[in-house]
Amino acid sequence: MVRYRLLAAGAIVAIVAAACGQGASPAPATQAPASEAPATQAPASEAPATQAPAETPVAGTPKEGGTFVVAIPGDLNRTDPALVDDANSTYVLSQVLETLVTLKPGTGGEIVPALAESWSISPDGLQYTFKIRQGVKFHDGTDLDAAAVKTNFDRWMTIPQAYVDLGYTYYIDTVITPAVKSVEAPDPTTVVVTLNDANSAFLIQMTLTPFAISSPKALVDGDASAPDFANNKYATGGPPAAVGTGPFTFKSWVPGTEVVLVKNPGYWNAAAGGPYLDQVTFKPITDSTATLNAIQAGEVDLVQAISPVDLATVQSDANLQAIDRGGSCNVGLLAMQSSKPPFDNLKIRQAVAAAVNRQALVDAFFGGAGVVPTTWSPPGTAYAKDVAFPAYDPEAAKQLIAESGVTDLSFDFWYPSDVTRAYMPDPKGEFEAILRDLEAVGFKPNPKTAPWRPDYLAAESTGEYPMWLIGWNCDWLGIDNFLYTAWFGYRGDPYGPNPEFSYKNDAANQAMLDALKATDPAGQEAAWGTALDLVTADMPALPIASAKTPGAAAAYVKGLIPSPTLLEIFQGVWLDK
Amino acid sequence: MIKYIVRRLIGAIPVLIGLSIILFAFVHLLPGDPATAILGQHATPERVAKMRAYLGLDLPLWQQYLMYVGGILQGDFGSSVINNQPLLKELMTRFPATIELTLGAMIYAAGVGIPLGRYAARHAQGWSDGAVTVISLVGISIPVFVLGLTLQYIFAVQLDVLPAAGRIDPRANLQIQSNFILIDSLLMGRPDLFIDGISHLILPAIALGSIPLAIIARITRASVLDVSNEDHVRTARAKGLTERRVDGRHIMRNAWLPVVTVLGIQVGGLLAGAVITETVFAWGGVGRFVVEAINNRDYLVVQNTILIFALVFLAVNLIVDILYAFLNPRIRYA
Amino acid sequence: MAAPAIPAGRSARPAEARASRGLWSDAFRRLLRNGPALVGLFLIALFVLTAALAPVIAPYPPLAGSLADRLQPPTAEHWMGTDMQGRDEFSRVIFGAQVSLVAGVVSVVMGVTIGGLIGALAGGIGGKVDAVLMRVVDVMLSIPGILLAIGIVAWLDRGLPQIMFAVAMVNVPIFARILRGSLLSLREADYVTASRSVGASRGRLLARHMLPNSLTPLIVAATLALATAIIDVAGLGFLGLGPPDPRTPEWGTMLTDSTKFLRQAPWLIIFPGVAIVITAIGFNLLGDGLRESLDPRMKR
């Protein structure tokens, strides 16, 4: 479910990403098996109390009004949440449209009610019954009810093939199409979703912005399912476009320049405080230095993501505050293609792992925001035990190369030329340092580069590169999201190893599948442990770093709750100036 | 004169046809395939085939070309395959931004460069001439992005006298009409926004204009010196005309020729420099847009945007040539 | 008049060669008396020597270093500090002279050759040839340079030769137009009209009278282009289209990489920046000197 998160379209210096994290306290709730789900459910009467940015972290009485200017690393792509899959678009649209359930603000995986005030799951894990909140109105004045939710589900399930062919429907393709069997609305406040198979990840998937509920009237008026996408107004800026229930309403989008949202005075959850801002303006600024200049000059109030090298500058500026999003929710990889020489040889892959000084890389390029991974997912991931990656030891690496018997040590090594990621803040710099480490033990890498989108991603994902830099920004903090979904599960088409790595180990894949279907925590833990050991023994890649995604805001910005997954709703934000 | 202009306009037709063919060939020569580019990681062979059909890429090249030209002639510029915005709409919002930026840079470059060059020529070999040379050399030697980021840092961050990025204070509620912010603000009767727009324009215009400024100053200097050595100038001086009259009537009148040529050529340079300046200053113009389109193999966007760039350029050069004829009667209508 | 035109044209060649040798040696003598030009020559000599002797001068190899030593300010050990990879900046600036020199000179020479040829044909022959060539130039010129370069790099793949070719092609229409423009204005000049009236052939006119006199603006433009060529290469780097080996010590790329560290390590911008400026000044002073030396009127 995640792949496309990497594709923040067109962003040159797009530090997208999320730092999901709870640090010391992992969130087992994320991994709550289906049978346990009712336990996490909030009773209807309590719902308002358990959600929303109710507790403003800073003292003071919120002031009403003002325009909040937010720098994002790339532009909005489409104005229909169902048809976007990049972090910039979802960051904007999550202010406008809401999902049935959402993540508790500031957490990476704690599910709380939103448009559904409660839910229950049938014992076999196949039926999800959502109780729809009453009295909520869409921005166009129409009422939210079960039929409206069903309309949205039905639209996702029958999305025009042309949109699928355009590649706009990644989340629908991966979450809805294979999993949802039917959706019924037996009464105005009840929606029943029936799945094909039990799936412990379904509920958390419903927190993703692409599954936000749009006004059925706007979907019709905006021709949101027009067979020819060119006639779809709803997704291309409208009007009407992006008509939801959120604290802000969509006003205008000038591509490349700005997206303007205005306050929704009739917001249903005003009891939780806010929205206070009159207007939110998103401005795409791609260059990281230009972004820092803009916030230091007071041109913008919030920078969604800054480069780790600028963290110290932000911290030392009295007019700014650094946004700490808790732990990390990403992993950067030095990836090796197991089907291409010399990386079809295990000893060579292990030699690479021993040759690279990861600690030096993290110290140099992550500005204190990164750590060397001790497993295949960020620190604090539930069920992800530490594994033994080869220690940095150039002599051992030389030894392994000698043992491998491989004599041709030359290969193409790729890095993306025009992008940064939280897990890869300076791809070129890291690439140069890794080159040096590899050459020191006798490898002969041949430097290669390509623009991130589309060339680099298209080539690496189809397994064309022997060695390359890549990584993963999570959708939620779960080992499944990294080990299985992103990298080493059999997710090829036809069924088989992911061509990106060509990592083939039937036992490891089976262990991951067992873990996903296990209904008890002990079973999950054991199965993931087996999978982690098997994958680590094969060293299909080397995890380089897990990093936080630092942001920056003006000192007068109050009430922002930083989110590890970048699901940051500005409902409680106010300007103290 | 009108006859001349008409003839030039007719002469532009083969250029545009040639350009459309070259652009068409060029985008199709680019390695990589737009269908694969759009689909990215989801590119299965069947999907690529469908996408190619959807984009009309499965047709013979000549047919694609005719469809492309037919579309333009009917005023249909197509849409971006990346965000599906109709290209015309997208260009209507982006081009004004680029035009304001390049005009600002041009005014800065010519407004400072020409007087600087004349001044240097008048004091040729003197110290101030040397100073002008060094200043213009430094100006030409700093890459646009380095200058832009440094200007931002000094004037916006450290001194806090000018805005760092964008075209207008985002907190101002300017109803965008034409997206010529300077014009819109005046139409709305908001001189404060006009001043805000100008203050946003200063740094990018300086960053973008510094290289043309240096070139214009150098060419002006060289050209004034050249003409100063001409017989007719010596004659004028010998006749006892005041230095001011010699300068105005005899030197500049002739020295303008190469300066005007360079001005015309620099318009192309400015449009090119705008690509980088717009990135640095979050300008929302057409430069950055077209670079992304090249990366994305967004054929129609690349072809049509560059075609419009070319139209602007040809129009400017037509004006330059008319000025030429006006300034030098001997080559009129040549 | 028409009949002896061919023999005259043939016999004109040796005469022409003699004459131009005279012209150029005169020019060279004048150049040596031109102070600023000598300074320029000195700076260029310094630059070329630096490039040639880089392995001898540089205290460290350009790629050697360790992350532990990164971003050190200038010290006695590292005169220009160290870069983000912990490499000695001074050594990289020295080695950078090699790459930048080659990139600048090759691309400008390529551009002047192709552009000059087109301009000379168009301005010298005139008529239909001029019209056709100028329309071609108009087409090339109407595509903004950096987009042309991006396209060429996208088409031919990355690499220093491709980048040099791309930068050259950006300059071609400019050089062609400048040469053609000055040839055109000379066509009507009194001495050309006079030579024509005494029966000088077109080729002789072009080679003997018009070209030397019209080279002046081309030389000025070419020297300036040397500086911009180095910067154009850097601009391509900024847009992510630089040489594929990021370790290559190239001044423009070094500048680009350093913009991220504007606050932490300003010296990384200053030193390669100063190197580019000094080189640009050198080429420009020399270009100016050449312009003045080549101008026959300076004989007076």
Image (cartoon, helix red, strand yellow):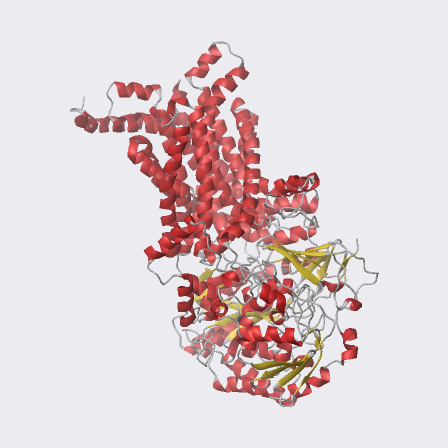
Q: Residue furthest right?
A: A60
Instruction: Determine which quarter of the picture holds residue A191.
Output: bottom right
**Is B162 located above or below residue A569 in the figure?**
above
Q: Residue at x 39, y 45 (%)?
A: C169
Q: Nearer the viewer, residue B186 or B307?
A: B186
Q: Is residue C59 left or right of residue A201?
A: left
Residue A145: image quadrant is bottom right
Name the residue nearer the viewer: A226 or A443: A226
Residue nearest the viewer, comparing B94 with A32? B94
Q: Which image quarter holds the C terminus of chain C? A: top left
Left or right placement of residue A558 versus residue A230 in this view: right
Q: Does C261 appear above or below B253? A: below
Give left or right: position of A142 versus A228: right
> Residue B230, image x and y in percent?
42, 19
Q: Position of residue A541 (x, y in %)?
A: 51, 74
- For the N terminus of chain C, the quadrant is top left
In the image, residue B295 sits, relative to residue C6, either above or below, namely below
Residue B315, quarter of the rendered image: top left
- Residue B203 in view in this figure: yes
Camera sees residue C286: no
Residue A263 in the image: state x and y as whole percent.
72, 59
Q: Position of residue A94 (x, y in %)?
A: 65, 66
